[in-house]
């Protein structure tokens, strides 16, 4: 593994989050390719999960807890559920990933302040990677900010301007930061809103159903508790002190309980007695 960067950016330097105000996706793409460094490129291909900085599962667990505490599941669509769309979105992505994998590459760029490869945009998919992606490398759309060089780039292909211009579901924004023009790319931006709304409705129906009952050996989904024998879902945690990522296990259990997937590992078992039919 090697990485080279042509200058130093201090850790205490402020981040710039403001988008460059250029109207039109075509104009932004043209601007990006005109002003990026000659050593900077977009690449497409597989990157091993170990090379990516993934956010702590606490960042996912907190909005999920809020979703249940505020009883957003009582609302049958995402608009009436307020601004907390994290849980229906993460359930949709988890179900889709476990069924078919990711349908589009994950956007990743190098962050020179922290010297890590970060997933952005795509925080929710980053959590899916951390919780459920265990084996094969991850298909990524990668920007080597500042011309940084990693060994994995040798097996990736350049992603040229024409491929961006021909994509009609593309979201493409630019941020001037890290002394570069950073592209923020979502190749499937238009699927988020309708699927989040569909899964909000599904969660509402599922949690209102008398067939949704849970037994767990720690306190999750308590309003739906039943005896171990009678519960339609059984959840068992290995809650020994050596377990490093208990927030991640809780997130995984809550997601699996909703989407109807059974699961078994050394640290978590989720058993469904009743077949679940999630949205297609």
Image (tube, grey):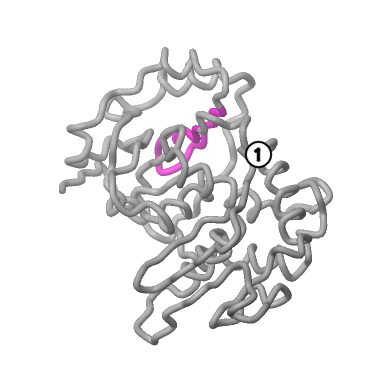
Residue 25 in sight from this viewpoint: yes
User: Is residue 56 or residue 12 the one in the foreground?
Assistant: 56
Q: Residue at x 57, y 66 (%)?
A: 61
Left-right relation of 232 to 217: right
User: Is residue 251 or residue 163 the one in the foreground?
Assistant: 251
Identity of the residue furthest to the bottom in this view: 241
Q: Residue 139, percent across and down?
A: 35, 37
Q: Is residue 126 above or below residue 47?
A: below
Q: Secondary structure at mark 1?
A: helix
On whether residue 183 falls in the magenta region, the answer is yes
Q: Residue 12, percent across and down?
A: 43, 61
- Segment tinted magenta in the rendering: 171-185
Q: Residues within 10 Å of mark 1 (few under 14, many from 20)?
A: some
Left-right relation of 82 to 15: right
Q: Main secondary structure of the magenta part?
A: strand
Q: Residue 149, percent across and down?
A: 22, 39
Q: Quadrant of residue 66?
A: bottom right
How many circles with numbers are drawn on the protein? 1
Residue 9 in sight from this viewpoint: no
Q: Residue at x 34, y 22 (%)?
A: 159
Q: Is residue 262 above or below residue 277?
A: below
For label 1, the residue is 195
Q: Residue 209, percent across and down?
A: 76, 60
Q: Residue at x 39, y 73 (%)?
A: 267
User: In the picture, which quadrant includes the C terminus?
Assistant: top right
Q: Quadrant of residue 110?
A: top left
Q: Quadrant of residue 150?
A: top left
Q: Residue at x 53, y 50 (%)?
A: 124
Q: Is residue 214 above or below residue 201?
A: below
User: Is residue 276 or residue 129 the one in the foreground?
Assistant: 276
User: Is residue 239 or residue 184 the one in the foreground?
Assistant: 239
């Amino acid at each position: 593994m090697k990485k080279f960067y042509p200058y130093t950016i201090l850790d205490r330097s402020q981040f710039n989050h403001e988008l460059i105000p250029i109207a039109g996706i075509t104009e932004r793409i043209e601007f990006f390719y005109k002003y990026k460094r000659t050593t900077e490129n977009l690449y497409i291909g597989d990157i091993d999960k170990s090379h990516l900085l993934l956010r702590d599962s606490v960042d996912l667990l907190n909005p999920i807890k809020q979703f249940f505490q505020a009883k957003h599941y009582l609302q049958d669509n995402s608009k009436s559920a307020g601004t907390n769309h994290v849980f229906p979105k993460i359930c949709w992505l988890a179900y889709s990933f476990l069924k078919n994998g990711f349908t589009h590459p994950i956007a990743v760029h190098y962050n020179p302040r922290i010297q890590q490869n970060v997933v952005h945009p795509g925080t929710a998919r980053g959590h899916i990677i951390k919780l459920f992606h265990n084996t094969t490398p991850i298909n990524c759309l990668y920007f080597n900010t500042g011309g940084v060089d990693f060994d994995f780039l040798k097996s990736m292909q350049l992603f040229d301007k024409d491929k961006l211009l021909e994509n009609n579901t593309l979201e493409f924004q630019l941020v001037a930061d890290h002394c570069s023009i950073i592209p923020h790319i979502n190749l499937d931006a238009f699927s988020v809103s309708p699927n989040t709304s569909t899964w909000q409705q599904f969660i509402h129906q599922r949690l209102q159903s008398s067939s949704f009952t849970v037994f767990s050996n720690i306190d999750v989904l308590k309003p739906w508790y039943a005896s171990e024998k009678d519960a339609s879902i059984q959840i068992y945690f290995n809650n020994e002190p050596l377990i490093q990522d208990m927030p991640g296990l809780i997130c995984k259990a809550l997601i699996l309980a909703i989407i109807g997937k059974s699961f078994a590992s050394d640290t978590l078992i989720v058993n469904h007695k009743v077949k679940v039919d999630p949205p297609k």
